[in-house]
Image (cartoon, rainbow, N blue to C red):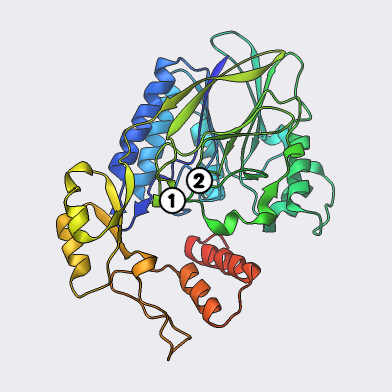
Amino acid sequence: MRFLHTSDWHVGKVLKGHSRLDEQRAVLREIVQVARDHRVDAVLVAGDLYESSAPSADAQQLVVQVLLALRRTGAEVIAIAGNHDHAATFDAYRPLMASTGITLAGGVRDAADGGVVEFTARSTGEPVVVALLPFVSQRHAVRAAQLVTLTPGQAAAGYGLLVRDLLAALTAGFRDDAVNLVTAHLMAARGKLGGGERSAQSVVEYWVPEDAFPPDAYYVALGHLHRRQSLPAPCPVHYCGSPIALDFGEQDNPSVVLVVEAEVGASARITAEVPIRSGRRLRTVRGAVDELARHAGEFGDDYLRVLLCEPARAGLQQDVRRLFPNALEVRIDPAFAAPVDPVNTARPSTPAGVERGPAELLHEYCVTRELIDERVEALFARLHDQATTGNA
């Protein structure tokens, strides 16, 4: 049987104030075409369908339309919630989507209560068993373990151990006569960040060890990390990555979806890494304004992050934006930035055109106070994440 593995659509993502909904519509249209061209038996969407836990009506409409279009190809469609999604909303719409043949999984469920999905592959007639593990936050891990494993669990136990227990419980019913698959949204050990993930949910305590994945799984379809990668584990474990570069930190990541073949009695194999080309390229360019102006014709319609190799001056940012209408971010290269103000050491002087996020501002403050502690910055990132997404 053949299936398509995709994840991390982040529909509704705004980049530096620019909506990318039209790009996302084109990207998802490509994915539907891949499913149609390869006549896949199933589509596994491994979380983060949305950018926000409170997506706009337009974002919701697009996701629903795409899921229905994927279903119209004849494929089974299974989508789980990621850390950006609102799990309760997924579960609220689960019965409605099920009536169209689409499986949504928001929260962790017992195998008998929807945590495992079974179907027959239309192309081969083989039975397929899919264990579903949506994103589990650390603060809910013990509760989820109690729900699925029926054991009390210890709060002191590591997050990875609890996730291993969840996966063991969900895959306990894997069959010798079926293609056994897992789809999950999590941070696996040795996984490499793609560059745009939310840092508060990529810190060390969210990692899951390689031995958490069951050796009898034919394939584990992961979401959460935006970089395409395969991981060492007792079974085939893969991140497909995001099909669109979501941030300038992801500008060099290949945007693909995976087409995978599996049969009873053998590990799955990836038969195609299909490039997705509809998203606009993100590009970082560096140089003085006069130098960059000579190469302006090379940038096309790429979205630009401009790092200026010259001191700040009045009107500099406006000059850059007139030359490059697609410049979404304009900064002074650190080598040309003004030094820290020696009079007011609690607050570095800020050159024109430099924009800093809350995490960067906190880091700079800690530097000036000589209070460098990665744990404090990770805690701040987590709290800021909860405050701004409503996932408290």
Label 2 crowd bin: few (<14), some (14–19), many (20+), radius 10 Å: many
Disc tally is 2
Q: Quadrant of the C terminus?
A: bottom right
Pointers 2 and 1 in contact (C-beta within 8 Å) = yes
From the viewer's side, name the closer residue of 331 and 23: 331
Residue 100 seen by the camera: no
Circle number at residue 249:
1
Q: What kind of residue is marked 2? A: Gly
In the rendered structure, the answer to whether residue 158 lies left or right of residue 372 reads right
Name the one closer to the observer, 116 or 324.
Answer: 324
123, above or below 272, in the image:
above
Residue 3 appearing in the image: yes
Left or right: 144, with 301 as reference point: right
274 up-or-down from 137: above or below:
above
Residue 322 in picture, x, y percent from top left: 14, 59
Q: Secondary structure at mark 2?
A: loop
Q: Earlier in the sequence, mark 2 or mark 1?
A: 2
Q: Position of residue 241 (x, y in %)?
A: 50, 38
Q: Residue 116, image x and y in percent?
A: 67, 31
The residue drawn where x is 78% and y is 42% is: 165
- Asked if residue 361 is positioned above or below residue 390 in the image, the reply reads below
Q: As drawn, is 381 to the left or to the right of 10?
A: right
- Work out which residue is located at the far top of the displayed protein and give it: 124
Residue at x 32%, y 64% (from the top left corner): 331
Quickly name the residue at label 2. 194
Residue at the (52%, 81%) spot, across then down: 368
For badge 1, the amino acid type reads Gly
